[in-house]
Image (cartoon, rainbow, N blue to C red):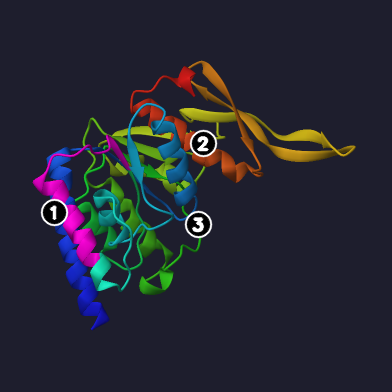
Amino acid sequence: MKEIFKKIIVYIITLEAKLVLKKYKPEIVAVTGSVGKTSSKEAIAAVLETEFSVRKNIKSFNSEIGAPLTVLGCDNAWYNPVLWIFNIIQGLKLLLFKVEYPRWLVLELGVERPGDMTRLMSWIKPRVSVITAFSDTPSHVEYFSGPEGVIKEKLKILKNLQNEDYAILNGDNVLSSELKEKTNAQIVTYGFSEGTDFTASNYHILLKEKEGKTVPEGITFKIDYKGSSIPVRIFNTFGKHNVYPALAAVATGVTAGLNLSKF
């Protein structure tokens, strides 16, 4: 019974979300990968919010339910039928009335089973698709023939990109960097590797004096792009893996028309 209820709800809210996108025509950033999706989504939204109105997934709700709920601006009602009716009414209000709607949607998209990304891409048309990185053993691999099956499904996020759109790829990740031949979109790469479009350099740990001791307080690095360089400081965060979301965010911001000097 719960499964039937879920299918009905998914059908209704997906239909509403599809119609909402058609009516308001927001720009969409779609984010996927095996690692770093949520942190990249958060960083991308923070950068775009400096100039535009933005909506992003709540937490990591990135499924066939989470994506349409984000488009509709509603919370997950789980198995509460009253709250689902409220969400459906909210979707109808968006369709029946003209309301202020975000200029950009930042949608983290995940897959659990074969066909998940195919279904999402049947109604989501990104302007920018960001692929973070793929691990050797992706999550939910038990539902696929192997890790390559998960990756193949996630790569369908590139399916709807046109020549004027952007595929933003982690140039340090072998699987991500090999995707250049799989899309007609404009390719933008980021990472520590020489030759990436947005290159991280001068990474080191920030230190401070506290109670007579030297303790770490965060990380600092530079982002180099076309001869320009911006310094970045991130507090209460440690490790090079935390550089990648910032790189993806700045790359997305530039493709959206933001000036690098604003970051």
Q: How crowded is mark 1: few (under 14 residues within 10 Å), some or many (20 or more)?
A: some
> In terms of secondary structure, where does tag 1 sit?
helix
User: In the image, residue 232 lies at what x, y percent?
Assistant: 59, 28
- Report the disc number at residue 92: 1
Question: Residue 159 or 212: which is nearer the viewer?
Answer: 212
Instruction: Please tell me whether mark 1 or mark 2 is closer to you in this view.
Output: 1
Q: Which residue lies furthest to the left in this view?
A: 96
The residue lying at 25 percent from left, 49 percent from top is 71
The residue lying at 51 percent from left, 36 percent from top is 246
Q: How crowded is mark 3: few (under 14 residues within 10 Å), some or many (20 or more)?
A: few
Amino acid type, callout 1: Leu
Whichever of callouts 1 and 2 sits on the residue coming sooner in the sequence is 1
Question: Residue 129 or 46: which is nearer the viewer?
Answer: 46
- Residue 240 vertical placement versus 118 (above, below): above
Number of numbered callouts drawn: 3
Is 256 left, or right, of 85 in this rendering? right
Callout 3–callout 1 Cβ contact below 8 Å: no
- Report the disc number at residue 135: 3
**From which residue to which does the magenta span run?**
84-105
Is 25 left, or right, of 113 in this rendering? left
- Report the disc number at residue 246: 2
Whichever of callouts 2 and 3 sits on the residue coming sooner in the sequence is 3
Label 3 and label 1: CA atoms lie apart by 40 Å
